[in-house]
Amino acid sequence: MKGIFPIDKLQRLQTPFYYYDAELLRNTLRVINDEAHKHEGFCVHYAVKANANPKVLRHIREAGLGADCVSGGEIEAAIRAGFPSSKIVFAGVGKADWEINLGLDHDIFCFNVESIPELEVINELAIAKSKTARVAFRLNPNVGAHTHANITTGLAENKFGIDMRDMLKVIEEARRMSNIRVVGLHFHIGSQILDMGDFEALCNRVNELQLELERHHIQIEHINVGGGLGIDYEHPNRVPLPDFRAYFDTYAKKLKLRPGQTLHFELGRAVVGQCGTLFTRALYIKVGSVKQFCIVDAGFTDLIRPALYQAYHKIENLSSDEPKETYDVVGPICESTDVFAKQTDLNRCHRGDLIAIRSAGAYGEIMASQYNCRRLPQGYMSDEI
Ligand SMILES: *Cc1c(COP(=O)(O)O)cnc(C)c1O
């Protein structure tokens, strides 16, 4: 098992750092393309917020995916990585004027709009540039997802999207605006979703809304169903790829596309999650009265998911074959939440051991901070070390 990492090369690098398996990333992208392109009109974007490491972005751009951006900075990162602006989508509840202008200047494919006040600002800024902004309305489908409460987004109580009961009203309003063209509807129900039934529920809701639009003779070119497909955090070796076939087949079977319509996806975690590992070293083994701690040199400034969402990451000691012992794996930051795992079994740890925190390719490096004046972790691609 330890054979999946080039340990000798990794030993030479300063911890903590992220390591991305280029071969796994390429395989993942190949399967995504194979499975999506079985279905006519399917179009896959990558949600840049999951990981904007330029080397990771380059692989994804080379595979031909579009870029789903949620800030001006992400639009810039996507363009720097070579994504054509015709494949860039800009979403987010709070777009600042400069970010909208950036999107207009680059003639991006589409703005995903979340409120009427935002639409008015986009229209005004487009008028000032004599441009037409293509928009999709992000509707809140009020579909729950069986995932962590902090990462469900499709319920009426979430801040995201426009209430679907206002759908006709906002489309009518947009049609009166001179420099706006409505091209799509957009949805996103949450993240780390493994139950295809949740995506099915979204399909059913989209079908209902399409029928309602047709009753009012409104035709929509693009349906965007967001992302959210989860990965297997428990078994990164056994299940390195999410079930893309089941995912795309669910949409192909359940969502009734109209002739000529395209169906867009914005996958983040499912694309990059399993290819990334955070490498850290054991600094000290501290034996307390009731438990023992493995204190490592990575902290929540490097990987915040456990502290932020109580997320599970599989942890392995790559330097030891000794019998397993139970540890709390903790970082050096001055916060009690700086814990990667409680009561987890690792091969007996010693100072200097190389520890792998798995499935950290998504929402890992990109969420790193400098709290405690710490350095940001480096990110390495397997084919460059
Ligand atoms: C975060 C986000 C995504 C990607 O979510 P994943 O769970 O990483 O696939 C897609 N679309 C929107 C609108 C998002 O906010």
Image (cartoon, helix red, strand yellow):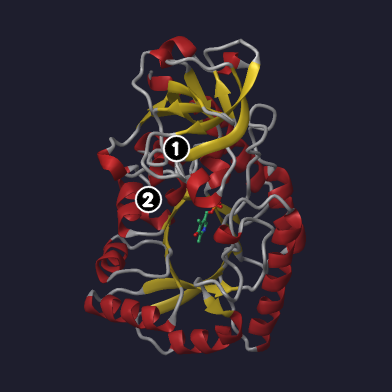
Which quarter of the image is occupied by the N terminus? top right
Q: Name the residue: 32% across, 79% down.
A: 121
Q: In the rendered image of this protein, does residue 72 appear above or below residue 30? A: below
Locate residue 202, reporting x and y percent.
68, 66
Q: Which residue matches tag 2?
A: 84
- The extreme front residue here reads 289
Which quarter of the image is occupied by the C terminus? top left
How far apart in space, not on screen, are marks 1 and 2 (Cα)?
11 Å
Q: In the rendered image of this protein, does residue 79 appear above or below residue 113? A: above
Q: Name the residue: 36% across, 13% down.
A: 12
Locate residue 255, reporting x and y percent.
71, 64
Q: Residues within 10 Å of mark 2 (few under 14, many from 20)?
A: some
Query: Is label 1 in contact with label 2 (beta carbons under 8 Å)?
Result: no
Q: Which residue matches tag 1?
A: 62
Q: In the rendered image of this protein, does residue 280 appear above or below residue 205? A: above
Locate residue 349, reporting x and y percent.
53, 17
Amino acid on which disc 2 is placed: Pro
Asked if residue 218 lies left or right of residue 97, the reply is right
